[in-house]
Image (cartoon, rainbow, N blue to C red):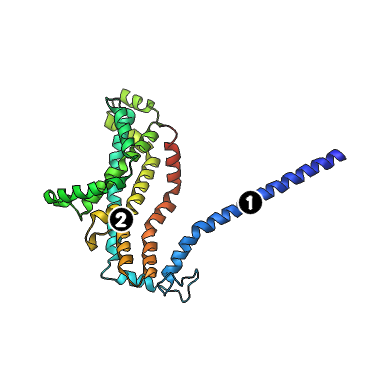
Amino acid sequence: MPEKSFLEKLRTSATAQRRLSIAIRLIIAVFLIIFSIFPVLWVISASLSPTGTLATQRLIPANPGLDNYRTLLSMQQFPFWSWFLNSIKISSITAVLSLSITTVAAYAFSRFRFRGRQTMLKAILLINVFPSLLALVAIFLMFSQVGDVIPFLGLDNHNSLVLVYLGGAMGVNIWLMKGFMDTIPRDIDESAQVEGASDWQIFTRLILPLLRPILIVILILNYITTYGDFVLARILLRSNEKYTLMVGLQIFAGAQFQQRWGVFAAGALMGALPIMIIYLALQDQIVGGLTRGAVKG
């Protein structure tokens, strides 16, 4: 009887500890959820509030409506849709071009052995150690001078902005793609070579289909990084109709002396919709591609 009572006490104590552990985890999870969702709810509330100011903003606004959205879409001086389409265009072109160049370069570094291979890989990694902000002045001066000779690669041009984004994104992506590609067995290449396949056929027909998870990851990361950039776009773009969404909203917020934060919040929410849709649709591919690409470097 005493042994049985002792065992029951142990079971009761273990059950109480599990319940306490679960309760603590739930409390922490609820706190983190509230902490992450509260700013989003505040912005949504500001976009629906007719006051247009943050001084008297409440989480549940009085007389909520869609007036801020109507004002945003009807302004002539601040063309929201032009900014929105410019961001989508620049981000899409940059993501596709960067993915294409990155994939070919990573295949060469992963499958071929040539002189200077390790040096080039280390140089790519070393260049990305330095923050891009250090090159802002040089980038501005370079494109201001290039624009005198080649107008479509000068300031206030989307082409020059795409080139800058391509140069800054390929370094990390090449290492990420190479790490993923190293996990693919070389037996596939050797078997195809025995059958008489060329390197390009091996790459396009055998290796490329296996790279789908990491291709999606790099495409999404490039798109999101470019879409949310402000500094480079603010330096290289000059005219109102060529601004990206981030630059346009900042110009709008700075030019409105009445501080129309309701309209600004509406624009921020509408601008965030493409990123939200991409994340919700492809979140499994993002996690799978990142974890598999980190297995082998």
Dot 1 alpha-carbon crowd within 10 angstroms: few under 14, some 14 to 19, many 20 or more: few
Question: Would residue 57 be visible to someone looking at this image?
Answer: yes
The alpha-carbon separation of the residues under discs 2 and 1 comes to 43 Å
Dot 2 alpha-carbon crowd within 10 angstroms: few under 14, some 14 to 19, many 20 or more: some
Quadrant holding the N terminus? top right
Q: Residue furthest top?
A: 194
Q: Quadrant of residue 126?
A: top left
At 39% from the left and 53% from the top, the residue drawn is 278
User: Which label sits on residue 226?
Assistant: none
At 42% from the left and 37% from the top, the residue drawn is 293
At 84% from the left and 40% from the top, the residue drawn is 4
* Residue type marked 2: Ile
Residue at mark 1? 24
Relative to 157, 100 lies left or right = right
SS category of the residue bearing label 1: helix
In front of the other: 179 or 35: 35
- Judged by depth in the image, the label closer to the viewer, 2 or 1, is 1
Residue 52 location in percent, x, y? 40, 72
Q: Quadrant of residue 131?
A: top left
* Residue type marked 1: Ile
- Picture layout, residue 17 above or below residue 42: above
- Picture layout, residue 286 above or below residue 250: above
Q: Residue furthest bottom?
A: 63
Residue 211 location in percent, x, y? 37, 38
Residue 129 location in percent, x, y? 35, 39
Residue at mark 2? 88
At 34% from the left and 36% from the top, the residue drawn is 125
